[in-house]
Image (tube, coloured by chain):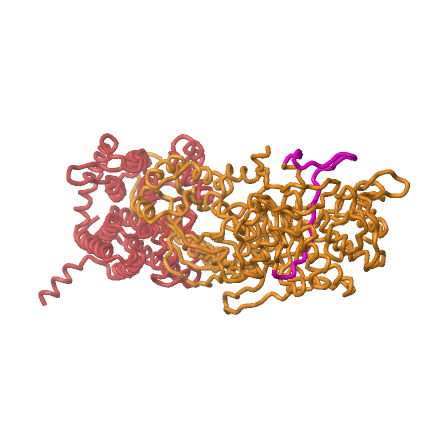
Amino acid sequence: MSGLRLINPEVEFLRYRRRMEIAGGVAALLFLTLFSRFVWLQIIQYDHYHALAENNRISLVPAPPSRGVIYDRQGEVLAQNFSAYTLEITPDKAGKLEATLDQLGEVVSIDAGDRKRFKRLLAESKNFESIPIRNRLTEEEVARFTVNRYRFPGIEVKARLFRQYPYGEIFSHVVGYIGRIGQHDLDRLGASEQLANYRGTDHIGKLGIEASYEAWLHGRTGIEKVETDSSGRAVRLLSRSAPVSGHNLYLHLDARLQQVAEKVFGDYRGALVALDPRNGGVLALVSKPGFDPNLFVDGIDSATWRELNDAHERPLINRALRGVYPPGSTLKPFMGLAGLELGVRKPGDTIADPGYFTLSGSSHRYRDWKKDGHGMVDLKKSITISCDTYYYGLAHQMGIEHMAGFLTQFGFGQKSGVDLDGELAGLMPTPEWKQRRFKQPWWPGETVIAGIGQGYVLSTPMQLAVATMAIANDGVVYKPQLIRAWRDPASGLMSYAAPRILRRIPLKPEFLRLVKEAMVDVTLPGGTAAVAGANAPYLFAGKTGTAQVVGIRQGEKYDEHRVAARNRDHALFIAFAPADAPKIVLAVMVENGGHGGSTAAPVARKVIDYWLLGKLPTVYAPSEPGATPPDEEAEDAGPADETVRPVLEGVAQ
Amino acid sequence: MILRTLFSRLFAHLDGPLVGLLALLLLLGSSVVYSASGESPAKMASHFLNLSVALSAMLLVSHIPPQRLMQFALPAYAVGLILLLGVALFGIVVNGSRRWLELGVTRIQPSELMRLAVPMMLAWYLHYKQETLRGRDFLVAGLLLALPVGFIAKQPDLGTSLLITASGFYVLFLGGLSWKIIVGAAVTAGSALPVAWNYLLHDYQRGRVLTLIDPSSDPLGAGYHIIQSTIAVGSGGVAGKGWMAGTQTHLDFLPERSTDFIFAVYSEEFGLIGNLFLLLLYAAIIWRGLLLASGAPSLFGRLFAGAIVLTFATYAFVNMGMVSGILPVVGVPLPLVSYGGTSMVTVLVGFGIVMSLVTHKKLVKT
């Protein structure tokens, strides 16, 4: 269609109106689309968007509780909190980490150790978590950083509670330590549905009381509901549930006693357990060497850790609970009771000791520590002078099953149940056990040496202390407990831990009296611990023991001067005092200490002197120069005439 | 008496219902700006300054007779085109696009001028040719439209170029553009879309479209605006959180909340009921505007006024669609609600023109 169109204004206008109506209709349709979109968003999807807006707006900030303080029985602080400033980095927000650290190093000092620890923590954490780069900033450093803060996005100074152990090494194994929560802890917390309670907490008990009473010490995390703006700044507090501090714990431990016990070991390795026989309270629990638990709180650096872990003294092992040793002659009082109670021996029965024992039909000689024997020996004498031959025969007569059955009542081969983690059970062997373990029958000779606490028999110092408590208490065995009381943080009320009786062993009073008298005689002139017991103003009952570390071949003599220090026998001593009304029970183990009477018994004497008399030892070395030990038992060994002086590892090797 | 006469002379060219509706919208808008700005007195002062400038401009423009406006059409268009050319040659790059022209004392954005100049030019052209209107004339008109749009799209400013295309198209559509051409153009545009997607669009423009389809693909970047504004709208619910009580707004989660995203603020605080009210208010303004436009005595008046009202409708729709997440993010303010002088002046001047075109009946002979 070409050429001019005739314009009819009327038609033209009608077309305009129609076009206008179409346009208006389209506009209406589009507005309807908008309205349906609003209905969709604001009615149908309202819950979803409401939740999103609330999520935007509200953040839950955990308010970590302050950890319970640990006290000894006198109220001495063993573990406490202090507040300090840390410098923390949120990697997500901090940009290039290396460059940032370099710049940061110009403001506050950051050493190689800090960097190393930071890198390790970085590898373990998620990027949006804040990770400490420096702990314990000084006021001056805080001020210096604050001035330069604008240069470091994602880096903040935070006030945090730190754990401190004022006694350091002394309580390393008992009180333990806390460390940063690791994957393993997270798994455990997850399994016990405790993860929510640990939001905002980054340390957890790893060892000792700190670990076993974690649930009590930690407390309950509070939650602050905070309205935040888009940059995460808190605008106002909406609601708050206050954190509840952990329980303060009061232990049976006595810090002074523990210190004395720790010191009297001198340079020896070993362990000591002191119990209150009247309730099972653990008065002291020493494992030497220890370590400084404060090292672990900030995250120990790997070099130090490796050093501790690989050191041949094994300072990280709690010898009192996890050190298993042959009980040696300390088993004899229990064996004696077994003989009497099972009717194998009568109190007045005597044997003639030629210096050795043989099984019929065998030429093998089980030798007494005294080459020529002790002559005529009854039960009391067998304990006082620690006659081996008497117990070789007794064990053989009794048989291993009866022996194991009786001794198990005293806790041998069983965990004591003390309120610390990681305790080992030791071993009270039976033929059935040997069959299961080695697929071999039991040999009679194995019963013979088990009679003097050698062979397969293994026990921990804690077990020895518990067994000794059974004698001291006339058969009543309390569960050893560290916890004495705790204070509820909310009510402020103090609750006391009830003594828990594990067993009452039925023992005849006359048999008990006989064994106790014999144990008192041990520390009197003529006994194997006579030197250690000299002039004790209380009835001091004890029993020495020497646990063989290396086997000595038939016909060979144990010459302690030729044996490397590492292979020297372990010295043992069990004790209780006063024997007529016992207030303390002890088990002492001195690793490679030689003879129980000369190294372990003096340790016990000093500890008991302090506990009963308040007397601090004047000399701490376990062997006093010039003191001549009495004839000593040492299995398969000749008499030792010379004083054994403590041998330092370094010197000996 | 003299004062009354003066007043009636002053407001002689205003349309009562339309001005009433606009005033209601401006009032509503001011209250939202107040909330969105966080009760900032400085911002409110400048908002009211903008408002008075824009209203005065509207009043002023309503007095300009249509003949005078028609005389402006060609020069305004020509000047605009020259300025666009200037932008292309000497323009200042801001945020990656070349939109501004430095004029010594101030910088201007010529594409803003073209929002009114292009439909005015096209309306004038069709009016001028109305006696002999044929297909070829629409082709010329199309070229007159394509030239500035091409420049603006090249800046690049896709949003403005599309909206100017729309306003030009409204003139042609109302002027009787053949359906065949409309359908043909639509088909061509549809089939050219893949080509445009691959070759003509800039990365950021593609990104905006992709983000619209899946905002969560870039929650902290381009998607952030859409996600947060959709949350604001949705969480408003039926009744809204109450004026000044929008959490998305007042806790700083909404970006550009007093300008392009102000609808999210309104929607969050006044809910679906408020939205319905706003839609009805816009619809009433558009209704009244179109009614007035169709009563304009000249073809120029009808076409220009109609295009202005439809463009206003388009702005409102595009802005609300973008904020509620059904259209890609283009920089379009919510007309007469968003904070910002330029947009307010442009829109109210537009309505001033509409009223001028329809109230000067007696003086114009067609």
Q: Main secondary structure of the magenta part?
A: loop
For chain B, the rendered hue is red
Quadrant assignment, res B30: bottom left
Does the magenta portion include A277?
no
Residue at horizontal 17%, vertical 37%?
B103
Q: Position of residue A183 (x, y in %)?
A: 56, 45
Does residue B275 appear left or right of residue A590 in this picture?
left
Q: Quadrant of residue A258?
A: bottom right
Q: Is residue A535 visible?
A: yes
- Whether B114 is drawn above or below A496: the answer is above
Magenta residue span: A537-564
The residue at 68%/41% (across/down) is A640
Quadrant of the snapshot with the N terminus of chain A: top left
- Of all residues, the one furthest to the right in this rendering is A361
For this orientation, the residue located farthest to the left is B2
Q: Give percent across and percent down for residue A108.
A: 35, 41
Relative to the observer, which residue lies in front, A524 or B229? A524
Which chain is painted in orange?
Answer: A
Q: Position of residue A617 (x, y in %)?
A: 54, 53
Q: Nearer the viewer, residue B35 or B60?
A: B35
Q: Is residue A39 visible?
A: no
Residue A549 within the segment the image draws in magenta: yes
Which residue is more in the foreground, A34 or A395?
A: A395
Q: Horizontal and vertical percent for residue B181?
A: 39, 38
Quarter of the picture holding the C terminus of chain A: top right
